Image (cartoon, rainbow, N blue to C red):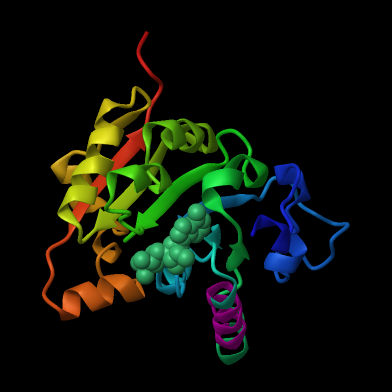
Amino acid sequence: SDSHFPVPILPCQVNYSLHYPQFFPSSDQIDSSKKIEFADIGCGFGGLLISLSNLFPETLMIGMELRDKITEYVKERISALRVANSGHYQNISVTRTNSMKYIPNHFEKGQLSKMFFLFPDPHFKEKNHRRRVISTFLLDEYAYALRVGGIIYTITDVEELGEWMKACLESHPMFEALTGEELVEDPVVKLLGSATEEGQKVARNGGETFQAVYRRIMPSL
Ligand code: SAM
C-alpha cells in the first residue's frame, strides 16, 4: 500500500542530489533553476529513460513506477550504466510512487515539458476504467504539471484503450493533437514503440500499436 513509500509533501522536497548526484553534488547546493522536465509514468523496466538519456543528456528525467521490485531493478540498472559509462546516464532516475495520486506532490505547475504513458495497463472491464492512467480527471492534473507547449505521449497495443486515450485528450480543452508533420519531425515519437520492454515485446509479436501525441495549450476562452 501507499504507506510503504515516502511521498514528498511539496515538489521542493524532491531530493535532487539523491537522484542526480553528478548534477547536484551536495544537497545544500541545489541549483533550483534546474528541475526534472520529463516524466515516464509507469516506466516499467526503464528502457525509455535509457534511450532518452542519450538523446537529451542535459535534461533531468524521472520514471514513476508503482511496483517496488521493478523500481529497485531500474535503480540498479541506472547505477550499473553510470559505472560502465563514466559521465553518462546521470540525468535519469526512478521513484516508486502511485502516479494516479501523487503527480502534484512531485511537480510544480508548468514544470514538465514531456510526459510519457507507454503501454499502460489496459483495465478492460468497465468498472475498472477509473483505474486507467489517462482520464479526463487526470488530464487536468497532467495539464497542471505540463508547461504550455509541453507534450504528452501515449501508445498502446490495445485498440480500445488507444481510442479511449485519444478521446480523452481530444475532448480536453488544454490539449491539441500534433500534426502529421510535427510527429515526423519529433525524434521522440520514433522511440515510443521501440524503446521500452513492453514495446519491444509487442513489436516481436508483430502487434499493432495505437499512439496519441498531444500538446498542452492555453485553452481559448
Ligand atoms: N511503460 C513500460 C513499458 O512500456 O515497457 C511499462 C508498461 S507496463 C504494461 C505498465 C507499468 O505501469 C507497470 O510496470 C505498472 O507497475 C505501472 N503502473 C501501473 N499503475 C501505476 C501507477 N498508478 N503509478 C505508477 N506506475 C503504475
Residue 74 located within the stretch drawn in magenta: yes
Residue sitting at 25 percent across and 31 percent down? 170
Residue sitting at 58 percent across and 45 percent down? 101
Taking the image as shown, residue 77 lies to the left or right of residue 210, namely right
Q: Is residue 165 above or below residue 140?
A: below
Taking the image as shown, residue 200 lies to the left or right of residue 21, namely left
Main SS category, magenta section: helix
Image location of residue 102, percent across then percent down:
61, 46
Q: Is residue 104 above or below residue 53?
A: above
* Residues in magenta, as a range: 70-81
| Front-most of residues 65 and 18 | 65
Residue sitting at 26 percent across and 76 percent down? 200
Looking at the rendered image, the quarter that the C terminus falls into is top left
Residue 155's quadrant in the figure?
Answer: bottom left
Residue reaching furthest to the right: 28
Residue sitting at 60 percent across and 58 percent down? 97
| Front-most of residues 50 and 172 | 172
Task: Tell me if residue 148 can be seen.
Answer: no
Image location of residue 132, percent across then percent down:
38, 47
Image location of residue 90, percent across then percent down:
61, 72
Q: Is residue 73 above or below residue 121?
A: below
Looking at the rendered image, the quarter that the N terminus falls into is bottom right
Ligand 1, by image quadrant, is: bottom left
Residue 6's quadrant in the figure?
Answer: bottom right
Image location of residue 19, percent across then percent down:
68, 66
Taking the image as shown, residue 70 lies to the left or right of residue 33, namely left
